[in-house]
Image: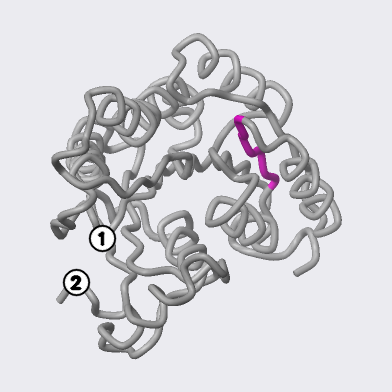
Amino acid sequence: MAKGIGPLIGKTVLVTGAAKRLGRAIAFAAAENGADVAITFLESEREAREVIRELERRGAEALAVRCDVTDEENVRETVKEVAGELGGIDVLVNSAGNYETVEFDKLTLARWDAIFASNARGPFLVSREALPYLRERKGKIVHMGSLGGLRPWTTHAHYCSSKAALHMLTKVMAKALAPEIAVNAVAPGMIDMGEKTTATFMKRMAKETPMRRNGTAAEIAAAVLFFATAPHFITGQIMAVDGGLGL
């Protein structure tokens, strides 16, 4: 889609953790729908530069900023830079986070705290710092939740708990930040990113999913774009995009 066309024309979208995977797909979808796009990355600088080149090829004004979303001062500086460079923030997508499989009796306090820092504290910090800009434009916040925050997975106690916390944060923020800002979350199920190391697992999960397949990054990006462009009256929702797996 050429620049100048789409429901996000004239708007700025900030996507955290968008150098790879779902964040990358969301950034591309935002650009394809007319937005200028800022992304954050932590360690994947090379991939982030590739994303910026692709965003610019699609007609977007684009910016990549290194940011540790768990660090308060770093987040404050990053949000200020994004708003200054791109003129404000209309939509914040909190995509940065971590996923880890650990047996319950092998969980350490360090692992527990690290997952909560990235998956719950990070979205809170970025959202809080972006509030003045989002309020000014009556913006939207979309958190990246998880089916694991809705259903218990025995080998993911820390991950599931952190995403459940993020889902509750979504609902609290929706009430606390209304009427200026709408806040929602997308909760992906099994999303096939084409990784060879997970091919066997993905094949098994596809058989267990009512739709008889796993999801795609494009489908998650479409769900995020729905919330980014939806009526402001839609807020506080957790949308499971899981092919019926959670039913």
Q: Residue furthest top?
A: 73
Tell me which amino acid carries mark 2: Gly
Residue located 36% across and 38% down the image: 181
Which quadrant is home to the C terminus?
Answer: bottom left
Circles 2 and 1: CB distance less than 8 Å?
yes
Please tell me the numbered disc located at residue 193. Answer: none
Magenta highlight range: 36-42
In this view, 84 is above or below 159: above
Residue 122 percent across, percent down from the top left:
39, 28
Total labels drawn = 2
Q: CA distance from mark 2 to mark 1?
A: 7 Å
Which quadrant is home to the N terminus?
Answer: bottom right
Q: Earlier in the sequence, mark 2 or mark 1?
A: 1
Q: Secondary structure at mark 1?
A: helix
Return the residue at label 2. 246
Residue 100 percent across, percent down from the top left:
36, 46
Tell me which amino acid carries mark 1: Leu
Please tell me the numbered disc located at residue 147. Answer: 1
Residue located 23% across and 49% down the image: 156
Residue 205 percent across, percent down from the top left:
32, 78
245 lies left or right of 59 = left
Q: Nearer the viewer, residue 177 or 187?
A: 187
Residue located 50% across and 9% down the image: 73
In this view, 55 is above or below 203: above
